[in-house]
């Protein structure tokens, strides 16, 4: 049995908001991952079951390894259909935001959301950012940083709302995919016993868990496999006396390996499989935005979100965070050199 995730008053509000809603938009963060897409699609399914017309609107297209998710084909992506995305947000009478807590994370969609007077409901699992450039302005916020994923938060919410018996297999597989991808297949952030209770309940809906794994992780292009080999062999740099490593990836290198969105996903984790490694950082040129994307992963109590906030204007979770750097790749690496020196004591 799961304990309630929200108060009785909040549950009443959740129901009232849905009862008064005719057209909802569900949105999630840019460069969507399994949790962003999974939680959005499952939530959309639930809202439709309440008779609401729902559109899922995301800032960016899905990476190839998520396009198999049921309902993914109907998602409106701002990078492909900006007018349709903005129109859907303008017409929504409720905007549900999942897997982010800062409007800066939905890029250009933020303007449309800010212009809308529709109430916003937030379902998330991120720690609050120190810098709330654009406040979310939500009427109801369900955020649990101790949870694996926004998908798991959503599951608890739907469980508490009494929806579980009506939950469809498609919704269950979306929630499972979000939990699986945000925990590296239950390898991290997944020590709470409830995680496996939720998984066992989801499995009763009859989807093929092994196939979900293959769909996400055994679904790479040959280019991506070669790119991984290239990065690990030629680009991964280990600090000599510190338990930290990084790699860089330039636009030229990405073109050489016919880079597709999502192709670098997860490679940063590989640095951490080296014995004793505490911090792994990836720098990737974002040729569209003209910035360098920074991804950080750590183990134990090394706060890579703090480092990301202090040096790369970002944030995230204790062990998985991200940010951006405006400047050259050399400058980005020099900034990291400074950062690891400042955190030297924790990296020895
Ligand atoms: P990734 O390395 O996969 O892009 O991001 C890992 C995690 O870091 C995300 O789940 C998110 O919590 C956080 N994150 C990534 N980029 C940013 C950013 O620019 N700002 C903040 N605050 N968090 C980020
Ligand atoms: Mn997430």
Image (tube, grey):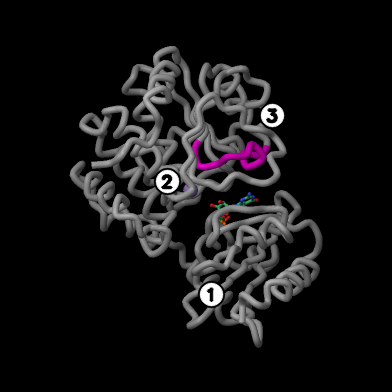
Q: Which residue is mark 1?
A: 271
**Distance from label 3 to label 1 (Cα)?**
37 Å
Q: Earlier in the sequence, mark 2 or mark 1?
A: 2
Residue 11 left/right relative to 82:
left
- Name the residue: 76% across, 72% down: 338
Please identify the quarter of the rendering in which residue 312 is found: bottom right
For label 2, count other residues whose C-alpha is less than 10 Å away and answer few (under 14), some (14-19) or many (20+).
Answer: some
State which region is magenta: 98-107
Quarter of the C terminus within the rendering: bottom right
**Element marked by disc 1:** helix
For label 3, count other residues whose C-alpha is less than 10 Å away and answer few (under 14), some (14-19) or many (20+).
Answer: some
Q: Which residue is mark 3?
A: 111
235, above or below 335, in the image: below
Q: Earlier in the sequence, mark 3 or mark 1?
A: 3
287, above or below 47, in the image: below
- On residue 279, the disc is none
Q: Earlier in the sequence, mark 2 or mark 3?
A: 2
The answer to whether mark 3 is within 8 Å of ligand 1 is: no
User: What percent of the width, then of the height, locates residue 303?
Assistant: 59, 63
User: What percent of the width, then of the height, locates residue 69?
Assistant: 37, 44
Q: Is residue 112 visible?
A: yes
**Element marked by disc 3:** helix
Name the front one of labels 2 and 1: 1
- Residue 59 falls inside the magenta stretch: no
Residue placed most toward the observer, 226 or 347: 347
Q: Which residue is mark 2?
A: 67
Q: Is residue 76 visible?
A: no
Residue placed most toward the observer, 345 or 38: 345
């Amino acid at each position: 049995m799961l304990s309630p995730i929200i108060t009785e008053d909040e549950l009443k509000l959740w129901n009232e908001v849905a009862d008064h809603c005719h057209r909802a938009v569900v949105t999630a963060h840019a460069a969507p991952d399994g949790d962003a897409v999974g939680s959005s699609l499952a939530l959309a399914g639930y809202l439709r079951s309440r008779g609401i017309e729902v559109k899922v609107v995301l800032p960016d297209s899905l990476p190839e390894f998520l396009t198999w998710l049921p309902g993914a084909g109907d998602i409106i992506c701002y990078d492909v259909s900006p007018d349709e995305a903005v129109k859907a947000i303008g017409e929504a009478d409720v905007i549900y935001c999942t897997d982010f807590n800062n409007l800066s994370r939905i890029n250009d969609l933020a303007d449309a959301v800010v212009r809308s007077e529709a109430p916003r409901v937030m379902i998330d699992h991120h720690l609050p950012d120190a810098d709330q450039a654009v406040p979310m302005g939500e009427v109801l916020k369900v955020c649990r940083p101790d949870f694996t994923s926004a998908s798991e938060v959503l599951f608890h919410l739907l469980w508490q709302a009494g929806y579980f018996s009506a939950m469809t297999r498609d919704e269950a597989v979306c929630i499972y995919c979000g939990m699986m991808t945000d925990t590296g297949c239950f390898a991290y952030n997944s020590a709470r016993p409830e995680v496996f209770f939720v998984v066992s309940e989801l499995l009763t809906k009859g989807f093929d868990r092994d196939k979900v794994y293959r769909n996400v992780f055994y679904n790479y292009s040959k280019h991506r496999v070669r790119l991984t080999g290239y990065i690990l062999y030629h680009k991964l740099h280990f600090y000599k006396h510190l338990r930290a490593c990084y790699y860089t990836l330039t636009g030229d290198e990405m073109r050489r390996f016919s880079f597709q969105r999502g192709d670098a996903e997860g490679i940063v984790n590989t640095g951490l499989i080296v014995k004793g490694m505490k911090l792994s950082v990836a720098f990737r040129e974002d040729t569209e935005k003209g910035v360098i994307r920074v991804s950080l992963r750590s183990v134990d109590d090394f706060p890579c979100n703090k480092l990301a906030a202090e040096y790369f204007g970002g944030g995230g979770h204790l062990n998985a965070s991200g940010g951006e750097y405006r400047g050259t790749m050399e400058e980005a690496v020099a900034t990291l050199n400074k950062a690891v020196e400042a955190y030297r004591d924790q990296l020895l």
